[in-house]
Amino acid sequence: MTAGGRRGFTVALIGCDGAGKTTVARALERATELPVRYLYMGVSAEASNRQLPSTRVAHAIKLRAAARPVRGSPPHGVRRAGRSALRLANRLAEEWYRQLIAQAFVAGGSIVVFDRHFLADYHAFDVAGARRPLSRRIHGWMLVHAYPRPDLVVLLDAPPEVLFARKGEGTLASLARRREDYLGLAHAVGIDRSFAVVSATQPVDVVVADVATLVREAAAGR
């Protein structure tokens, strides 16, 4: 249990690439007195610290398929529909698997710090996106209506110019769109009361201290 014998809770660090989510999450785990357990909640197979075996297999198959042409395969439409269904099934299984891990940590009294969160990362595409295929609509509905929300969401925010200078990924326009989606997420999915914004333009130690203060306040209020 956390201090005072209370149950643990979950904290999601979200934001564009370059905001410092992993750095801050690992610092909270390593450099504070908080009973933090780190859990990656994004789609990168390489970054995941917990992952279903089926996801590792699917990732390996995807890499092999990209390296060589497929002969004697079903018609394109059938093949695409089958792949889409399999991807959706594995994605849902993976997301619930990590949620179950988080719940086990919480039951043991840990503060589980999520590096990213599926609802935040997929909101622009699977929830708010236009002309979504069926698999995306199903996935978006599940994330909004069935998937547990973090107890606290902290957006590490920075202007597109800062994010691009740090990572060099995407464009200023795409980063600006993603930033606006993250900034509007709290109102869009009804988590205003558990949503905080921390400037990621500050030195890393200041960002970590600011987030740690928010986590301690959340713990004290439970």
Image (cartoon, grey):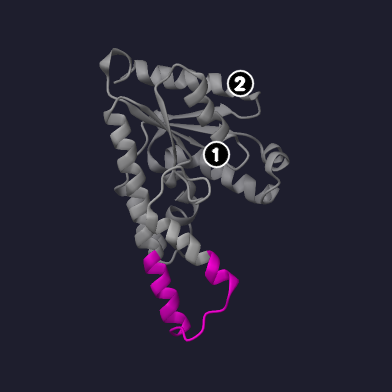
Q: Is residue 73 left or right of residue 89?
A: right
Residue 199 is drawn in which quadrant? top right
Q: Residue at x 35, y 26 (%)?
A: 110
- Is the residue 62 above or below the residue 33 in the image? below
The amino acid on which the numbered mark 1 sits, given as a three-letter code, is Gly
Please rate how many residues cluster around mark 2, counting C-alpha atoms within 10 Å: few if below 14, some from 14 to 19, many from 20: few
Q: Residue at x 34, y 61 (%)?
A: 89
Q: Quadrant of the N terminus?
A: top left
Q: Mark 1 = which residue?
A: 15
Majority secondary structure of the magenta segment? helix
Q: Is residue 161 left or right of residue 57?
A: right
Q: Quadrant of the C terminus?
A: top left
Give the secondary structure at mark 2.
helix
- Is the residue 221 above or below the residue 132 in the image? above
| Residue 143 appears anywhere in the view | yes
The amino acid on which the numbered mark 2 sits, given as a three-letter code, is Asp
- Is the residue 85 above or below the residue 40 in the image? below
Tell me the magenta residue range.
63-86
